[in-house]
Amino acid sequence: MQTNVQSFAVANLRRRPEVVETGGFVAGFDPATDSPYINYATPLPGAEPTAADVAALVAAFRSRGLKPRLEFAPDRAPSVEPALRAAGFGTEEVHEYLVCRPGTLTPPPRIGDGPGHLVESPAADEEYTAIDAALAEAFEGEFASSPEGAARLRRIQEGGGAVRFVRAPDHGCAGAASCSAPAVGTAELAGVGTRTAFRRRGIGGAVVASLTAAMFGLGAGSVWLEYSGEGSQRVYERLGYRAEGTRLYVSLER
């Protein structure tokens, strides 16, 4: 059974602080940041937008001083990509997504002769701040650590999703990830990052396995994620994730 990541994308964007729905598109905005990775749109499954619909969507971004940007599974809305191309949208990336289900989850083995990594849930403000800083370092400047970033992580944790991390020897964060609250039977696991000094120690796999199990415990029938590079793909496949489709990232330059 295929996981409907497009229906999930719609439901997840509707959780943003500000939502605009126009012409078969849902755009989610967070006034606390101008990050294109937070402020973007996605089509409703099966949408067949006209040129006017695309123009209205672009206007919703332009009026906020943001780059028009979308993320979606093209096979679930095949008429959308041609309409966006006609309006001048270009490809940023195409990502394959992997899916794990309760019957395929395989927790990682212990590390060496020790008990493995202790995966924790953050509670204190300083833990959220440390996680945000660690992820900013792990993603090498894609975004800056900020109070708003830490606050978004707390909202995920307190809004039905989950954040997990492995503590560093200095009591900061060695690596972490988060998972959205389940919707339409699935949940998206994202932002898997490990600080440079702690890589290749199994931290990412431990965090992903813990988050995946947590979502299954909340009743999700599947968890999905996107990967970058063959190394991370192998890590996720060892945990029970399997390829199931692609997602397209497009944007319109200002």
Image (cartoon, rainbow, N blue to C red):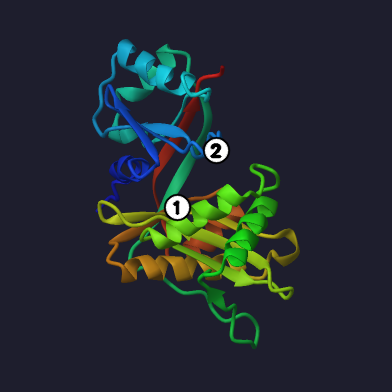
The answer to whether one can see residue 140 in this image is yes
Between 226 and 39, the one lying in front of the other is 39
Mark 1 or 2, closer to the camera: 2
Which secondary structure lies at badge 1? strand
Which secondary structure lies at badge 2? loop
Q: Is residue 195 left or right of residue 131?
A: right
The crowding category of the residue bearing disc 2, from other C-alpha atoms within 10 Å (few below 14, some 14 to 19, many at least 20), is few
Q: Is residue 126 left or right of residue 94?
A: right
**C-beta proximity under 8 Å, tags 1 and 2:** no
- Looking at the rendered structure, the number of numbered marks drawn on it comes to 2
Q: Residue at x 36, y 65 (%)?
A: 215
- In the rendered view, tell whether residue 12 sits above or below residue 74: below
Residue 174 in percent (x, y) is at: 66, 66
Residue 10 in percent (x, y) is at: 31, 40
Of the residues shown, which amino acid type is indicated by label 1?
Leu
Q: Residue at x 27, y 66 (%)?
A: 219
Quadrant for residue 103, please give it: bottom left
Residue on which the image places disc 2: 33
Quadrant in which the N terminus appears = bottom left
Between 231 and 253, the one lying in front of the other is 253
Residue 161 in percent (x, y) is at: 39, 60
The crowding category of the residue bearing disc 1, from other C-alpha atoms within 10 Å (few below 14, some 14 to 19, many at least 20), is many
Q: Residue at x 61, y 56 (%)?
A: 132
Residue 52 in percent (x, y) is at: 31, 11
Question: Which label is found at residue 201?
Answer: none
Q: Residue at x 41, y 56 (%)?
A: 242
Residue on which the image places disc 1: 225
Q: Is residue 61 left or right of residue 195?
A: left
Label 1 and label 2: CA atoms lie apart by 23 Å
- In the rendered view, tell whether residue 206 sits above or below residue 11: below
The answer to whether one can see residue 103 in this image is no
Quadrant in which the C terminus appears = top right
